[in-house]
Amino acid sequence: MRLTQFSLLFLILLSFVQCDKTSPEEVKNPAQEKISDSLKKVEEKEKEISYHAEIINHQDSALSVFQKKYSEEEIHNILAINRLDVKNRWRADTLVVPDKMEKDFNAYSPFPRNISLAKDIHKLALFSYPIHAYALYENGNLIKWGPTSMGKKSSPTKIGLGFTNWKKKIAISTSNSEWKLRWNFNVFNFQGIGWHQYDLPGHHASHSCMRLLEEDAEWMYTWGEQWILDEKGTKVIAKGTPVIIFGEPNFKTKPWKDLLKSSKANDYSEAQLNNEIKPFLEEILTQQKIRAEYLQRKKDSITN
């Protein structure tokens, strides 16, 4: 009898052991679950984004209805998606509008949230000629994106790698002394090309510079790093933030209108941007190291 009871007890315990096949490594960490859930929500949100067209027709009544329908922040985002600023909102007959409005403008980003090849680059600015947009990355992570109007056909923006150098809150255009460029940050010094605030009319219209919304230009004015010159101001000791301008422009099309057919129409993949960065990676990391070493020597000299 005792043996039978013992055998029965042994079989019950054995069944519990067999049922619990989870190894210690497979036990889920609550923090990991939370991050995983958060990423899933981001992915689901990105999948949910779709767009529709709203007709404006330059009519005061239509524009009035549009302005009443959406909040100031939503109008800002809609105009940015259509590469317009408030001043030029009347230029669009039709606006591409998200079906669901998101508070985080990065939800509409055509740029990937991470770029593996840029993980060692402290700060990087990318300007896409084809989709009229810029993106800012820190160690490969997207922190900001927005609309831009770059060089028109007769005065195209220089393609390739540049570095931010000097900056000025209000600069006077070399093309027209009446044009005041707010939050100007120069990138190609000898060509006088940089980013700054100016009209965004929904097409490439600049004289080679990269136009931005004023709030974006002001934010980037602080974000970017100036070059470091010697005491005489004649020799560059260290360069500023790397800027890559890429892609072949089409001066006739408005690529954001393709979002009406596919919400991913303007998207860049991580692989595509890795290919844009790869030719310049060595130079970027070299200049970054030169800057870091100079700043460290300067810090050590002050400390000592």
Image (cartoon, helix red, strand yellow):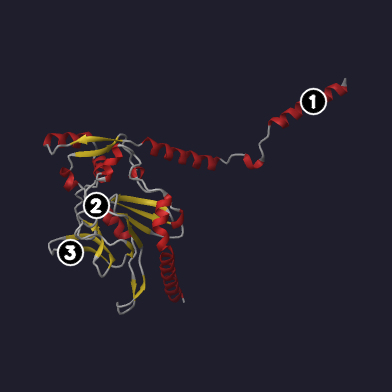
| Mark in the foreground, 1 or 2 | 2
Residue highlighted by disc 2:
213
Q: Residue furthest top?
A: 1
Q: Residues within 10 Å of mark 2 (few under 14, many from 20)?
A: many
**Three-letter code, disc 1:** Leu
Residue highlighted by disc 1:
9
**Three-letter code, disc 2:** Leu
Q: Tell me the residue at 83%/22% (across/down).
A: 5
Q: Does residue 258 appear left or right of residue 198 in this picture?
A: right
- The secondary structure type at the circle numbered 2 is loop
Q: Which mark is residue 164?
A: none
Q: Is residue 77 visible?
A: no
Q: CA distance from mark 1 to mark 3?
A: 89 Å
**Three-letter code, disc 3:** Ser
- When the figure is inspected, residue 123 is found, relative to residue 257, above or below; the finding is below
Mark 1 or mark 2, earlier in chain: 1
Mark 3 or mark 2, earlier in chain: 3
Q: Tell me the residue at 24%/62% (across/down).
A: 184
Image marks 1 and 2: residues in contact by CB distance under 8 Å: no
- The secondary structure type at the circle numbered 3 is loop
Q: CA distance from mark 3 to mark 2?
A: 17 Å
Q: Quadrant of residue 157?
A: bottom left
Q: Does residue 28 appear left or right of residue 132 in this picture?
A: right
Q: Quadrant of residue 50?
A: top left
Place of residue 201 in the rendered image (x, y in percent of width and height, measured from the top left): 19, 49
- The secondary structure type at the circle numbered 1 is helix
Q: Which mark is residue 173?
A: 3
Image marks 3 and 2: residues in contact by CB distance under 8 Å: no
Q: Residues within 10 Å of mark 3 (few under 14, many from 20)?
A: some
Along the line of sight, the residue nearer the viewer: 3 or 152: 152
